[in-house]
Image: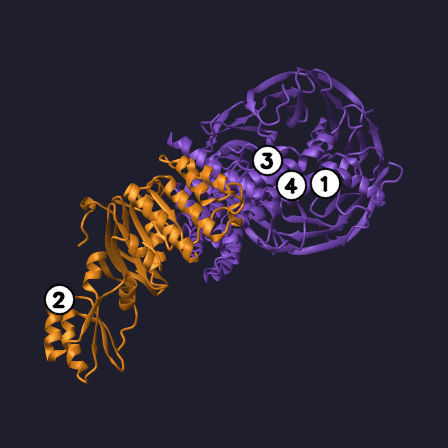
């Protein structure tokens, strides 16, 4: 049962299913993005993130289910809803012959809340040439123009579809810094897909992970990180018994090597871990927190032993 | 406010489109110079070219540019943006699909028509007179239709060939299917409207060719389908292609079905649908009315019927058919196209005396155009084609009786005349020498299968209008009276009356006893000049002030029936019917304010008309017996007056 948007959510995925022919890309995905939060939708290449974003922007009709923005079906109300949405697409593009100034002018007439000054200031700060055709800009500059345009309408919702794809380390860092600054200033809702999990970890409030066409994680990032732990202990030939003991913590990955066992658990709690450690006297078992990248890898990677 | 915003959005997108393809406008400016320099270039190359040709060259280039630029603009309009994933630039903004599509379309149209203006402009400025003749609505309609069609084709092709979807195979397979079905759907309507203005009665009052209208429809359907594709597929070219194809073939099938339905409706007009009679005549025997006219909602398609008074049934005759009715009213024949895809012509006959008279498709057929004529009793059909004359016996299995080759210069007869059931007289023109044209007179003996040249005469005028007396003794050509058999000149009316057209030929009309009447209407007054058997003017009778007159029949040797027309209005003129006594010169008005039922020139019904006249009124068909003066409503064929 999908809760109504009276809960203050800005985005509602309601049983979203996308199929291309016989191939199912997204299968019955449902989640909500609360107002003011930053939601990171993660998945491996081909997991269906871009299809989800296209459906979210009303560019693609879902095979089944629907997506609501601000309580309205986005497929049928796309044009009106886009007044409140800023978008940075995976590969920013514009009519090739238009220069940056013309693009800004074009966009300025479309949005009721357009802030021309902030757009100009940002582009000046980025040192983007205004009279150069969009097609002639570098990838980084295109991204900067896209970010400026997306924020120019002071949107209530920002949709970022892998915005740092193809950017170098410095450009990626700058991008997230700019974004963090904006989020601090405005408190808008953001949904982002990216493979740059370090950057995501800095800004995301909530994480969704798609695996095998399904949404397998939909959690607050802090909760997620608190549940996941890496546990290491020496191999004394009784690893299977210990492994079973770890099942209580919901083992998602186990690696056995010459020196010992390394397991990732997704339902960590201290009490259970202490019980495990005392089981058979493995007092030198270690537990460590995990980064988002490690958690993501553990979830979407193959379960190993 | 919202509307203004939408318009501004559309204009902004259109401007972007125009800017991105402005190179085409530059190209048209270069091309525009060609018609001006062509004549000079032609002279340098030793070709026969003239500055009067500038207009037609400019127009030809305009059409070529219309095709080329439309395809270029169309193919990149949506296809390029979809392929390059650039369409999302528009779709992530608060722009409706309609805004995006109309904006792009407006840009493309402005580009195509703007380039058209640029192409014509130099020719118009420097050679206005030569160019102006191609700036008519008709010429611009052709250009517009071509541009719409190829723009639509370009847009569709730009999407379906770029999408790399398996649906392309289906699209390509459906093209010949649509062409065949479309052809079948519209062939009847194209034939029904051939040689006429199209649909002037349903709002399109100009010269719209049905073929052009269908092409324009297909163009609009392709453009609309692209819009449907964009609305449902948005930024995904495969989905756009799928929606486009669904829309395109759905609309095409709707067009084909509409074509079938509309064609069927057009050609299924019944006599009750006639709102204005073009030609009509009651066939000898009073049982059948031959009638044609404008039918409700059918525009300029003129349905033709044989209407049976006895049982209220009717027979539809093809509009394009040349109908022959025998003088005794027993038979009707016409030549009809044998199927749509063949040029073969077939003779169709109806035996009007049969209880269930219906068209009988005979085995008499010919590969090309033929002309047909019936004997007075309808038993023989004379078919002429290039220098060949064939007689068929329609009463005995449509048997071929004789075919002869005519040793003449002209391929077609100037006049053919059934002297009786065994002899046919034929008049063929020879080659003009020093502005003099010989006319050979032949007689064909059917039983003996013998063709003989019996006479010849020469004419030194351009344009010949033949009238032959009922007994075949005399012949008038323009103002000269000849012996119809030998060609001997009997009288020259010294260029009075002036005969400049086929209708004027009626100004000399034969009456009983080898006499003839010249209707002199060259002044305000109409005068009948009666000539004796010996071609001498015997008397002159003034009918008073009128525009023209026509002898429609004879009640007795000395009592003529004359139609008197006050004004020249070929279709709706009202006329009076008079009886004129040649002995006493008494003129009696038999009927007044009659609407003109113009008799088709290929129908001769004088015998019948001499005794009665018919009027179609809102009450029905009214018969007036001219001898007794009695009126009678004989059947229910009526028309709003």
Q: Which residue is mark 2?
A: A270
Tell whether B30 sits left or right of A165. right
Camera-nearest residue between A172 and B374: A172
Task: Please name which of the two marks, 3 or 1, marks the residue nearer to the observer.
Answer: 1
Cα–Cα span, label 4 and label 2: 77 Å
Task: Tell me residue B180's x, y (percent).
Answer: 53, 55
Which part of the image, by quadrant, shows the N terminus of chain B? top left
- The chain identifier of the residue carrying mark 3 reads B
Work out whether disc 2 and disc 3 sit on a shared chain.
no
Give the colour scheme of this rendering. Answer: by chain
Q: Which residue is mark 1?
A: B57
Cα–Cα span, label 2 and label 3: 91 Å
Task: Tell me residue B621's x, y (percent).
Answer: 49, 30
Q: Image height check: is B448 above or below B28? A: below
Secondary structure of the residue carrying numbered label 4? helix
Secondary structure of the residue carrying numbered label 3? loop
| Count of numbered circles on the image | 4
Camera-nearest residue between B419 and B83: B83
- The chain identifier of the residue carrying mark 4 reads B
Query: On residue B26, which mark appears?
Result: 4
N-term mark: 4 or 1: 4
Callout 4 crowding tier (Cα within 10 Å): few <14, some 14–19, many ≥20: few
Q: Which chain is orange?
A: A
Task: Please name which of the two marks, 4 or 3, marks the residue nearer to the observer.
Answer: 4
Secondary structure of the residue carrying numbered label 2? helix
Q: Is residue B317 visible?
A: no
Camera-nearest residue between B137 and B472: B137
Task: Tell me residue B92's x, y (percent).
Answer: 39, 46
Camera-nearest residue between B560 and A19: A19
Q: Is residue A189 visible?
A: yes
């Amino acid at each position: 049962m999908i809760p109504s948007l009276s809960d203050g959510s800005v985005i509602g995925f309601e049983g979203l299913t996308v199929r291309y022919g016989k191939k199912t890309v997204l299968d019955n995905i449902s989640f909500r993005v609360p107002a003011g939060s930053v939601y990171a939708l993660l998945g491996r290449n081909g997991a269906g993130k871009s299809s989800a974003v296209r459906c979210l922007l009303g560019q693609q009709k879902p095979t089944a289910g629907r997506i609501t923005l601000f309580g309205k079906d986005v497929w049928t109300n796309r044009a009106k809803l886009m007044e409140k949405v800023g978008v940075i697409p995976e590969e920013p593009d514009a009519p090739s012959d238009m220069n940056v100034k013309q693009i800004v002018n074009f966009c300025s007439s479309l949005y009721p809340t357009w802030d021309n000054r902030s757009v100009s200031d940002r582009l000046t700060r980025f040192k983007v040439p205004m009279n150069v055709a969009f097609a002639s800009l570098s990838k980084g500059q295109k991204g900067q123009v896209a970010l400026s345009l997306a924020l120019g309408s002071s949107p209530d919702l920002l949709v970022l579809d892998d915005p740092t794809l193809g950017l170098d380390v410095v450009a990626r860092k700058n991008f997230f810094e700019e974004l963090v600054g904006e989020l601090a200033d405005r408190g808008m809702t953001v949904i982002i897909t990216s493979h740059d999990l370090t950057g995501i970890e800095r800004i995301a409030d909530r994480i969704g992970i798609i695996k095998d066409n399904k949404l397998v994680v939909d959690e607050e990032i802090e909760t997620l990180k608190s549940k996941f732990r890496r546990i290491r202990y020496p191999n004394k030939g009784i690893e299977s018994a210990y492994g079973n003991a770890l099942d209580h913590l919901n083992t998602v990955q186990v690696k056995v090597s010459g020196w010992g066992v390394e397991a990732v658990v997704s339902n960590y709690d201290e009490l259970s871990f202490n019980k495990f450690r005392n089981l058979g006297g493995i007092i030198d078992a270690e537990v460590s927190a995990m980064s988002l990248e490690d958690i993501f890898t553990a979830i979407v990677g193959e379960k190993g032993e | 406010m919202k509307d203004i915003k939408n318009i501004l959005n559309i204009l902004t997108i259109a401007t972007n489109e125009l800017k991105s393809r402005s190179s085409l406008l530059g190209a048209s400016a270069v091309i525009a110079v060609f018609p001006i320099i062509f004549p000079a270039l032609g002279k340098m190359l030793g070709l026969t070219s003239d500055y009067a040709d500038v207009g037609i060259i400019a127009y030809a280039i305009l059409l070529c540019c219309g095709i080329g630029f439309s395809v270029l603009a169309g193919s990149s309009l949506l296809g390029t943006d979809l392929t390059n994933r650039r369409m999302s630039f528009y779709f992530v903004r608060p722009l409706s699909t309609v805004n995006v599509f109309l904006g792009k379309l407006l840009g493309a149209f402005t580009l195509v028509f703007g380039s058209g203006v640029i192409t014509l402009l130099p020719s118009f400025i420097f050679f206005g007179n030569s160019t102006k003749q191609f700036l008519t609505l008709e010429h611009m309609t052709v250009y517009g239709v071509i541009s719409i069609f190829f723009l639509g084709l370009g847009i569709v092709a730009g999407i379906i060939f770029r999408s790399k979807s398996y649906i392309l195979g289906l699209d390509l397979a459906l093209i010949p299917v649509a062409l065949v079905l479309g052809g079948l759907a519209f062939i009847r309507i194209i034939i029904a409207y051939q040689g006429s203005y199209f649909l002037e009665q349903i709002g399109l009052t100009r010269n719209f060719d049905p073929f052009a209208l269908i092409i324009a429809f297909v163009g609009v359907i392709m453009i609309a389908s692209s819009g449907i594709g964009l609305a449902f597929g948005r930024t995904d070219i495969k989905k756009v292609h799928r929606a486009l194809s669904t829309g395109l073939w759905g609309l095409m099938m709707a067009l084909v079905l509409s074509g079938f339905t509309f064609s069927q409706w057009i050609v299924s007009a019944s006599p009750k649908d006639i709102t204005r009679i073009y030609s009509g005549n009651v066939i000898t025997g009073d049982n059948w009315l031959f009638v044609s006219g404008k039918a409700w909602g059918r525009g300029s398609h003129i349905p033709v019927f044989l209407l049976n008074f006895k049982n209220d049934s009717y027979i539809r005759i093809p509009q394009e058919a040349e109908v022959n009715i025998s003088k005794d009213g027993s038979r009707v024949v016409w030549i009809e196209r044998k199927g749509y895809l063949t040029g073969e012509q077939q003779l169709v006959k109806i035996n009007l005396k049969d209880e269930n008279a219906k068209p009988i498709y005979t085995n008499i057929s010919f590969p090309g155009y033929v002309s047909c004529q019936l004997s007075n009793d309808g038993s023989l059909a004379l078919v002429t084609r290039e220098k060949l004359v064939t007689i068929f016996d329609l009463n005995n299995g449509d048997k071929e009786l004789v075919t002869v080759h005519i040793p003449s210069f002209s391929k077609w007869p100037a006049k053919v005349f059934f002297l009786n059931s065994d002899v046919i007289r034929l008049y063929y023109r020879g080659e003009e020498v020093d502005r003099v044209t010989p006319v050979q007179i032949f007689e064909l003996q059917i039983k003996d299968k013998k063709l003989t040249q019996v006479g010849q005469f020469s004419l030194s005028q351009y344009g010949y209008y033949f009238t032959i007396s009922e007994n075949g003794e005399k012949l008038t050509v323009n103002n000269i009276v000849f012996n119809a058999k030998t060609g001997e000149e009997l009288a020259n009316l010294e260029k009075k009356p002036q005969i400049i057209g086929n209708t004027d030929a009626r100004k000399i009309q034969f009456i009983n006893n080898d006499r003839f009447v010249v209707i002199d209407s060259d002044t305000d007054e109409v005068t009948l000049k009666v000539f004796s058997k010996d071609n001498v003017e015997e008397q002159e009778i003034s009918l008073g002030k009128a525009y023209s007159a026509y002898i429609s029949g004879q009640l007795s040797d000395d009592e003529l029936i004359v139609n008197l027309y006050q004004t020249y209005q070929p279709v709706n003129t009202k006329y009076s019917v008079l009886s004129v006594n040649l002995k006493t010169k008494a003129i009696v008005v038999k009927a007044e304010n009659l609407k003109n039922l113009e008799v088709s020139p290929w129908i001769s019904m004088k015998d019948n008309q001499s005794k009665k006249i018919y009027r179609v009124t809102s009450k029905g068909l009214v018969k007036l017996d001219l001898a007794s003066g009695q009126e009678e409503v004989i059947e229910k064929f009526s028309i709003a007056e």
